[in-house]
Every structure is written in C-alpha cells, then in structure tokens.
C-alpha cells in the first residue's frame, strides 16, 4: 500500500511540473469558439500524520480530484473521487452527479455514491427542533418543477471518521425513502416522506453502541408530513404529524405509541418575536444511527423583544422521555429556563447578560434517582476602540448533583486588534471553583494572523486548566497550539499546511446527550490525550475551460430555472440640502446575499427566484456616519423576468467638538459639564479641555457651558453658549470657550494723567497723615481746545 501512495506522490510531482503547460492549454480551451460546454478540474494531494503519547496513531494520505463539466442542453456532470491510504485502502467521499437534466417538463437530478439527504421537509421556524441529515452510500433521483420536488433514494448509512482527513465508514443501517415537498398558493409549504430503516439482528447484537436499549429496531417504517402556513404577514403556523411502526430485536410487552406530532405558532414583527410549540415523538420516530431523535415530549416557548438599542430574550422548555414506560430504560425529566438582554450604550459600549437554569431528574435501574441542577449567570461588556475590540466577561455557574454542590466563577478579558495586514488577539481568564475545596486557575490564549497578498500565516496558542468545561461538559483542555499557512498562486495552485499539538482529557456525561440534544453518540465514555500532535499538508491545482454556471443557495443551477427576476433599488441619503445616492452601503436579503451600492447609491441582485423577499440595510456593515431613517428592512415581490425596485433611506450623522481653555491657551480642568440643546445631552471635558457630541443628525444646536460646574474662582470670558449649525458635507470648526481666573480685589490706587503721561501714585499707607487739602488736577486730552476737570 505504501508503494501505491508513493506512486500517487510521483504523479503529483509530474502534475506540478506540467502546471505551466496546462495553464496554456486552459487559455486555448477557454478562447476556442467551437468548444462545447464549460467545466473545471481540481486535483489535490493531502497527507496527515498524527502521534499520540509517542506512538503513531494516524497516517493518512491520498489523491483526490473533482471534475465538473456543464452541458448547456443537458445539465452539470460532477465526478468526485477521494481514495485514501491508512493501513489499507479507504474511501472518502466518492460520488457522481448529474444535475439539471431536462426531461418530461421537469429538471432531473441523479446521484450515485455518497450523498446527503435532509430529513426536514420545510423551513422549520423553531430553534429547539433539529433534524438530522442522512449520509448514505447509494443512489438518489429527484424531479423538480418550479414549486415541487419529488425524490426517491436508497442506500447504506455511512459515518464520518478521521481527525483531519475525514473518510466514510459504513454503519449498520440501510435506508429507503420517498419524498415530496413544495409550496401551495399563499406561500404554504408542505412536505411528505415515507422512510424505511433496517438493520440485521447480528449488527444490532454486535454493535450495541449504535443501538440504545429502547431503539434496537430490526426495521422501522415512518410516514411524516410537515406544513408551514402563513396566517398573516407576521404570524405563521407549523405542524408536523407522523405515523411509525417498528419491529424490535426482541419481543416486549411495552406498548409503543405510533403517533408523533409537533405544532405551534411563530409570530415575528420588527419589535417582537414569539414562538411556541408542543412536541411528542415516540422512540420509533426517525431512529437514525448517530442521532438522539425521538422518545421525548414537552412544550417549548421562546421570545425576543426589540426596544431600540435594547433587546430582551427568554425561553422555557420542559421535556421527558421513556414515553413507553419501559422499566429497563432510563427516565429523564428536563426543565430549562433562560433569559438575556443586550443593550447598546453611549460611546459604542455594548452590554449583554444572560441567566439560564437547567433542572434534570434521571432515574435508572443501576443508579436510582439522581437530581442535577445547573444555574448559570453571565455578563459581558465590549467596546471597539482604535482598531481594538475589547471584551470583558464575568460568569458564574452553580451545579448540584445528587446533593453535591459546586460553584464556578470566572472573569475573562479579551482584546483583538487589526492593523493593516496583521490581526492579533489575546485573552486571559481567571477561574475559581468551590466544591469540597477551592481551586483557582489562570487560562491564557493568543492568536496571530498575517496576510501577505497570496500568503496567509496564522498561529494559535492557549494554556491553562479550563475548569468551566471540566465542570459543565466534563472536559479539561490544558494546552493547545496551532501554526499554519495557506498560499494561493495566481495560476490556481494552492497550498495548505498546519501543525497542531494539544493535551486533552475528555469525559463524556451520557446525561448531556439528553439535556443538550447532542447530535451524535460517543463510542467511549472516557477519552484521554496527554501528548497529541499532528501535521497536515495539502496541495491543489485547478484547471478550468470557460466560466462555470452560477448556483443558488440550494446547489441548483440558476440558468436552468426560467422563473428568475431582478431585485434592485436605491439607498437614498436624505440631507437638509436634498436627497442623493448613498455610496458604499451594504444591502442584505433574507437569504444572506449582500451587495454594496455604487457611487449613485444603486444596488441590484441578479437572478433572484420569484417570490417574496426581504431586503434591508446590513447593520453590521453600515458606515458609522450613517443611520437608518424609517424601516431598515422592506418586503418585495419578485416576478419572473422583471425588475422589482425598492428604496431604502439613511441620514448622515455628524460630530460637534470643542475646546475649553484659558487666556494663555492652557486647557481647562477635567470634568466641566457641557450641554447640547435642544436634545439636552451632557458631556464633560477631558484632561486636555476637549469635549464632543457624536452621532448627531443635521440641525441647529446650541452648545453651552454649565457655569456651576466651573472651578472655583473661574468664570467664562464672553457668552456661555455658542450656536452651531450642523450640515452634511460642511465640517464644523471646533468650538472654543475661554476661561479667566477671578482674583481678590486689589487695594485702590490713584492714577494721575498729565500731558498724556500716565503716573501711578503709590498706595496710601495706614499711618496717620496730614489732612488732605482740596486740590484740582487738570488732565489734558489730545484736543487742545478741551480740558477735563477731575475733582479729587
């Protein structure tokens, strides 16, 4: 087998030597007017080596290639082969697909080999419901129309294994199914599925890890349907109903309910969101290997409230299992409550907090009755500052298991800074746990990334004892370090390299599978890694002949669907001088597609499927000097081969700054209060005497100094307020206020002016003097014809 791997490596070297020639052939192919279709070819070679505790654990290598060719009249052909070598020949994902074959008024998709099939029939609005994907090695055929999809599929389920280079292994379960899903008038979504799962008795007896006690089914047949009905613009209803019949490995007297259902409303508005459902699923509901589905019932409620910069959320869940009352199976009763808030504070501060409560009651023949209570409190404060992204988090976790109490507290300070092509991050976390004894630890981590054109270098390091994971998930991560690089050449050659090392101790709590609805079953209850390091390298080369067709979010070719339109519009910048286009503003749709406006404020989404779309401002990338005016998101109806226009509005935000100083140009003291009218906003001067008001819309304002906040023996020179006119595009000059220090009144002096010469007489002392005589002083002015008499 090593000879085979060396042969693959020699082929890779020859391929790299011919890269230049292949690039020239690529240009000829793409400019040939007689060519038919377009396509691409990707060839890669990867190698992975892992060592655990001084001995080799994994050594995987192999060559993979992907061929795609688009036939304008027949569809897209895809061939992917990924043979791997690890103690014998293994297989990664290997498949052949043909998408978009027109036949009988429909588009047909065919797949052979490894493929995935989601078990969700419609878009599910609830977050507490998760639907697994079937990973099958077999065949699938799908017929598609504009509104409906019909599928038939079958094969043997496969599972992914491998740390860095995944490969597929066969699971002891086969599947065969029929499915139909689509939409009715008024945007009603419906779906139906018939699924048969089967395993042999020998497989169940030999691999009990995959078959819990109440899920040892030789075969099961289920019929499921889902419907999502929009009742109003902001209210919709979801219902799932199913019937299942399962044959267990051994006969039992336990009565098994064949019915399953989930129903509830979902209400979503711009300010308020509320979702509620009730679920009941027997153990025969989708008993897919590797997933903990079925055997549960209970209600769930969640809500979200938006009040300007303040967001409030909450949820409540209650569920129990063992609906069949099987005395040999463990019983779980789980109740979860959580709530949180997020608020945007002045000066770009953001404050968030959450509280969650989990109460779990378990009962099993081996362990009896056990109670587990978890309380978690968390608070986080963050602020961007001069390229830095600062975070401070405080968390407390209280756990109680069978009368044993434990309290965990930690505080973490994190900073991430970006400067040109350099990204640096670091965090320090103090942890303290108090159970039978108190333990304190310090957890450190750092990251570094450098982008040099086509070369990307990165590194990650963390050190310490993670008490939080050790307490909640029974996982202790003591040390991890990663270094790597990626390089992409202009000729579509790419290189990936990564070195990884860690010390890891892992212990899985089986109750967490039920509480957290874990997606997967861990074969071993305890994993221990004391010295684990690995090296991974991958080199790839791509060739193409002509541009490939565009794909939508569902992996379908856009060009094959004739019912496409264009969603376009303008983002208007409304100022007091008039309206104009807002350039470089990102607009996003409800599917996550985003574009930026041009210099005129125009944007467009090409080849948008018909239907109702939501388009709005991307608030995460909205420039800081702009603010939405009116609705941030609009609904638009897209029609085939037509242009649908929408218009979004933003307003500019300005800055007013100033300085408070004395007559000598020295800054005033810190803490003097400055008021902005008519908003009645307050701020204070800093140590340099500066102050500022930010994020102000256009208008006329008045800035005044609150005189009772001035220092002692200080007063303003001139007016205490200055009018300010804020207009877009016209920078405002910094305001200046002047202070003077008021000293004690000096002793009186006499001033005598004679012939335009000023003489200051010395002050009189308190000694007794002769009585003053009446006298008269004549002061000459610049006019010789006038005299000013001053009586003294």
Image (spheres, rainbow, N blue to C red):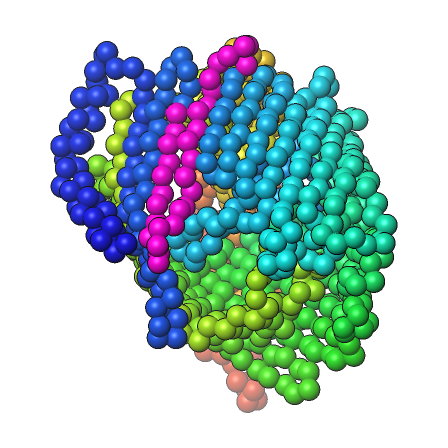
Q: Position of residue 410 (x, y in %)?
A: 60, 73
Q: Height in image: 791 above or below 625? A: below
Q: Residue at x 23, y 11 (%)?
A: 34
Task: Judge by depth and name the residue closer to the eye, 652 or 314.
Answer: 314
Q: Which quadrant of the rendered structure holds the N terminus?
A: bottom left
Q: Is residue 302 above or below residue 568?
A: below
Q: Which residues are magenta?
A: 77-106
Residue 541 visible at all: yes
Side (left or right) of 567 relative to 259: left
Q: Nearer the viewer, residue 75 or 463?
A: 75
Position of residue 641 measured from the top left corner of the image (x, y, whole percent):
52, 10
Depth check: give the residue in front, 230 or 699: 230
Q: Is residue 175 left or right of residue 5?
A: right
Q: Position of residue 388 (x, y in %)?
A: 44, 58
Above or below for 562 versus 3: above
Determine if residue 597 is in view.
Answer: no
* Magenta stretch: helix, strand or loop mostly: strand
Question: At 25% from the left edge and 56% from the top edge, which residue is drawn?
Answer: 2
84 in magenta: yes
Image location of residue 311, percent across then percent down: 69, 48
217 sits to left or right of 62: right
| Residue 316 is a magenta residue | no
Q: Is residue 583 above or below residue 690?
A: above
């Amino acid at each position: 087998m090593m000879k085979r791997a060396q042969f693959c490596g020699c082929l890779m070297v020859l391929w790299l030597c011919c890269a230049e020639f292949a690039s020239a052939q690529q240009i000829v192919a793409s400019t040939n007017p007689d060519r038919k279709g377009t396509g691409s070819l990707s060839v890669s070679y990867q190698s992975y080596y892992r060592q655990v505790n001084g001995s080799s654990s994994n050594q995987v290598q192999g060559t993979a290639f992907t061929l795609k060719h688009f036939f304008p009249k027949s569809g897209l052909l895809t061939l992917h082969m990924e043979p791997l070598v690890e103690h014998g020949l293994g297989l990664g994902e290997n498949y052949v697909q043909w998408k978009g074959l027109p036949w009988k008024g429909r588009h047909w998709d065919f797949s052979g080999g490894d493929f995935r099939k989601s078990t969700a029939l419609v878009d599910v609005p609830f977050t507490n419901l998760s639907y697994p994907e079937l990973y099958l090695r077999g065949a699938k055929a799908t017929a598609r129309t504009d509104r409906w999809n019909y599928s038939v599929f079958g094969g043997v389920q496969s599972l992914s294994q491998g740390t860095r280079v995944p490969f597929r292994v066969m699971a002891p379960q086969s599947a065969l199914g029929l499915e139909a899903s689509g939409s009715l008038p008024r945007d009603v979504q419906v779906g139906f599925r018939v699924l048969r799962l089967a395993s042999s008795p020998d497989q169940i007896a030999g691999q009990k890890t995959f078959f819990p006690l109440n899920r040892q089914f030789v075969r099961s047949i289920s019929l499921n349907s889902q419907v999502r009905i929009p009742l109003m613009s902001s209210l919709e209803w979801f219902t799932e109903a199913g019937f299942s019949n399962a044959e267990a490995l051994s006969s039992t007297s336990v009565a098994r309910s064949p019915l399953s259902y989930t129903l509830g409303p979902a209400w979503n508005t711009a300010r308020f969101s509320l979702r509620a459902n009730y679920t009941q699923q027997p153990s025969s509901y989708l008993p897919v290997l590797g997933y903990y589905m079925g055997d549960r019932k209970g209600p769930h409620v969640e809500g979200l409230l938006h009040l300007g910069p303040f967001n409030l959320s909450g949820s409540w869940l209650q569920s129990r299992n063992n609906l069949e009352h099987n005395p040999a199976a463990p019983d779980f009763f789980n109740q979860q409550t959580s709530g949180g808030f997020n608020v945007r504070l002045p000066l770009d501060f953001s404050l968030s907090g959450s509280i969650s409560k989990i109460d779990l009651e378990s009962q099993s023949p081996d362990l009896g009755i056990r109670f587990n209570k978890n309380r978690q409190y968390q608070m986080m404060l963050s602020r961007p500052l001069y390229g830095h992204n600062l975070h401070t988090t405080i968390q407390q976790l209280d756990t109680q298991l069978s009368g044993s109490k434990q309290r965990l507290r930690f505080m973490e300070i994190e900073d991430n800074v970006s400067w040109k092509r350099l990204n640096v991050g670091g965090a320090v976390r103090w942890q303290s746990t108090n159970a039978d004894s108190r333990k304190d630890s310090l957890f450190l981590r750092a990251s570094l990334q450098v982008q040099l054109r086509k070369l990307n270098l990165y590194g990650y390091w963390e050190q310490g004892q993670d008490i939080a994971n050790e307490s909640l998930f029974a996982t202790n991560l003591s040390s991890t370090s990663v270094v790597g690089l990626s390089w992409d050449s202009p000729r579509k050659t790419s290189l990936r390299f990564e070195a990884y090392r860690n010390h890891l101790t892992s212990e899985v709590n089986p109750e967490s599978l039920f509480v957290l609805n874990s997606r997967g079953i861990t074969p071993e209850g305890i994993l221990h890694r004391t010295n684990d390091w690995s090296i991974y390298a991958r080199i790839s080369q791509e060739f193409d002949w002509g541009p490939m067709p565009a794909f939508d979010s569902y992996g379908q070719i856009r060009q094959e669907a004739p019912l496409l339109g264009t969603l376009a519009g303008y983002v208007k910048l409304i100022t007091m001088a008039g309206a104009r286009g807002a350039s470089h503003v990102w607009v996003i749709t409800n599917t996550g597609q985003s574009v930026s406006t041009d210099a005129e404020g125009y944007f467009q989404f090409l080849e948008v499927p018909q239907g109702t779309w939501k388009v709005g401002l991307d608030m995460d990338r909205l420039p800081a000097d702009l603010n939405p005016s009116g609705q941030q998101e609009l609904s638009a109806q897209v029609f085939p081969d037509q242009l649908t226009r929408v218009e979004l509005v933003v307003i500019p935000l300005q800055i007013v700054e100033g300085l408070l100083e004395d007559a000598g140009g020295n800054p005033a003291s810190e803490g003097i209060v400055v008021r902005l009218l008519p908003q009645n906003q307050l701020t204070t001067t800093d140590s340099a005497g500066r102050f500022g008001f930010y994020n102000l819309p256009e208008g006329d304002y008045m800035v005044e100094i609150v005189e009772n906040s001035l220092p002692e023996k200080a007063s303003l020179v001139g007016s205490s307020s200055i009018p300010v006119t804020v207009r877009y595009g016209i920078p405002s000059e910094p305001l200046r206020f002047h202070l003077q220090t008021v000293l004690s009144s000096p002793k009186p002096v006499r001033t005598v002016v004679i012939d335009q010469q000023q003489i200051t007489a010395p002050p009189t002392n308190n000694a007794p003097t002769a009585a003053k005589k009446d006298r008269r002083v004549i002061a000459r002015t610049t006019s010789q014809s006038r005299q000013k008499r001053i009586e003294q």
